[in-house]
């Protein structure tokens, strides 16, 4: 599958149309297991047909009018249940309204295909889900490989060519990890860049949203649409641009891949500086001695769930992570809050 920018160019030229692309997406989505928790086919067909008419009239709503996208099942989509990847939420009431972020991209003409799978409650970087299945990483051709999480379904939906763009959330790597594992561009925005209203939370002060895409230009275009901008960007030369490469202990294969990317930057004139970044180690030491701030917030958010009969339905791994914060002393939380200032 091409990226969304190329797809929209095909819409503009008449080489393809949103209805045709949507039907291909729905067909593929039904063939690839565990990627979607639910499909919004009826809504998507209405949106695609309206988009096709706008393109025929030469009046698209945006550069991505008609482009299909998927939503991590933390975003409220009107008429659909937001499961958060949890079995106990299967029968929760359907959302009455779209989350603001969903509404913005809908008003830009994008076509919502469905809601993607994830680690339960978005609380794991592996992407495993015992309730809705685990999406298969398309790059695992020699042996099964984890998709990364927690935005596992969003990453695989893009990597498998179902949609060119999917929206995810990131608290501690949940966009970046699956993007890396699936060879995608993942943009983890700052926490207040986009509205998080009607998005199921994990840790209120750390949660953020962002797209998983097939190209940097697509990620940039989504950022523009979410801020109501319709500008054209011109790529700048990398000549003289300085990049700092942190000196860290990583596996040889990972470092080799990183260095290949660095060589491409150098070939385009970028300046690469390697240096120690003590902040990384200081952060790890802080977590080792005092815990992770997000674990306190996640426990506070889900304490009532853990004390209810529904706790028996939780993935044991997720339940253990949540429970681990129950007995942490308040002094450790204060250390973390103070260090964050």
Image (spheres, rainbow, N blue to C red):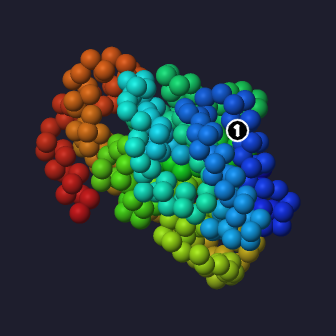
- Residue 122 appears anywhere in the view: no
- Estimate the x, y position of residue 126 in percent, counting from the top left: 52, 34
Give the left or right position of residue 311, taking residue 79 as reference. left
Residue hosting label 1: 26
Query: Of residues 19 and 88, which is closer to you in this image?
Result: 19
Q: Where 114 falls versus 136 (above or below)? A: below
Q: In terms of image quadrants, where is residue 145?
A: top right
Q: In terms of image quadrants, where is residue 337?
A: bottom left
Q: Where 25 falls versus 221 (above or below)? A: above
Query: Of residues 58 and 175, which is closer to you in this image?
Result: 58
- Estimate the x, y position of residue 20 in percent, counting from the top left: 78, 48
- Estimate the x, y position of residue 105 in percent, counting from the top left: 54, 59
Q: Residue at x 84, y 63 (%)?
A: 14
Q: Where 17 falls versus 319 (above or below)? A: below
Q: Residue at x 70, y 52 (%)?
A: 49
Give the left or right position of residue 103, taking residue 214 as reference. left
Q: Residue at x 33, y 25 (%)?
A: 320
């Amino acid at each position: 599958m091409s990226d969304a920018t190329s797809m929209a160019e095909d819409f503009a030229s008449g080489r393809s149309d949103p209805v045709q692309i949507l039907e291909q997406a729905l067909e593929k989505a039904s063939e690839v297991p565990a990627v979607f928790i639910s499909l919004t086919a009826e809504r998507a067909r209405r949106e695609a047909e309206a988009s096709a008419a706008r393109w025929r009239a030469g009046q698209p709503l945006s550069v991505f009018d008609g482009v299909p996208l998927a939503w991590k099942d933390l975003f409220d989509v009107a008429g659909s249940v937001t499961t958060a990847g949890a079995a106990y939420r299967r029968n929760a009431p359907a959302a009455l309204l779209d989350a603001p972020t969903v509404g913005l991209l809908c008003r830009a003409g994008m076509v919502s295909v469905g809601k993607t799978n994830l680690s339960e409650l978005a609380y794991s970087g592996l992407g495993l889900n015992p309730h809705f299945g685990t999406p298969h990483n398309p790059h695992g051709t020699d042996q099964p490989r984890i998709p990364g999480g927690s935005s596992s379904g969003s990453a695989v939906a893009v990597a498998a060519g179902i949609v060119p763009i999917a929206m995810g959330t990131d608290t501690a790597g949940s966009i970046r990890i699956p993007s890396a594992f699936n060879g995608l561009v993942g943009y983890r925005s700052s926490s207040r860049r986009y509205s998080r209203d009607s998005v199921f939370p994990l840790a209120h002060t750390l949660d953020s949203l962002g797209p998983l895409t097939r190209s940097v230009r697509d990620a940039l275009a989504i950022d523009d649409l979410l801020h109501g901008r319709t500008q054209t960007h011109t790529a700048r030369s990398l000549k003289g641009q300085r990049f700092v490469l942190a000196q860290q202990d990583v596996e040889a294969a990972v470092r080799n891949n990183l260095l290949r990317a660095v060589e491409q930057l150098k070939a385009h004139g970028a300046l690469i500086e390697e240096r120690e970044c003590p902040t990384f180690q200081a952060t790890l030491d802080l977590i080792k001695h005092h815990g992770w701030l997000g674990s306190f917030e996640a426990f506070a958010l889900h304490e009532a769930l853990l004390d209810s009969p529904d706790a028996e339905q939780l993935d044991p791994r997720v339940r253990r992570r949540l429970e681990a914060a129950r007995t942490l002393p308040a002094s450790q939380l204060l250390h973390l809050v103070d260090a964050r200032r």
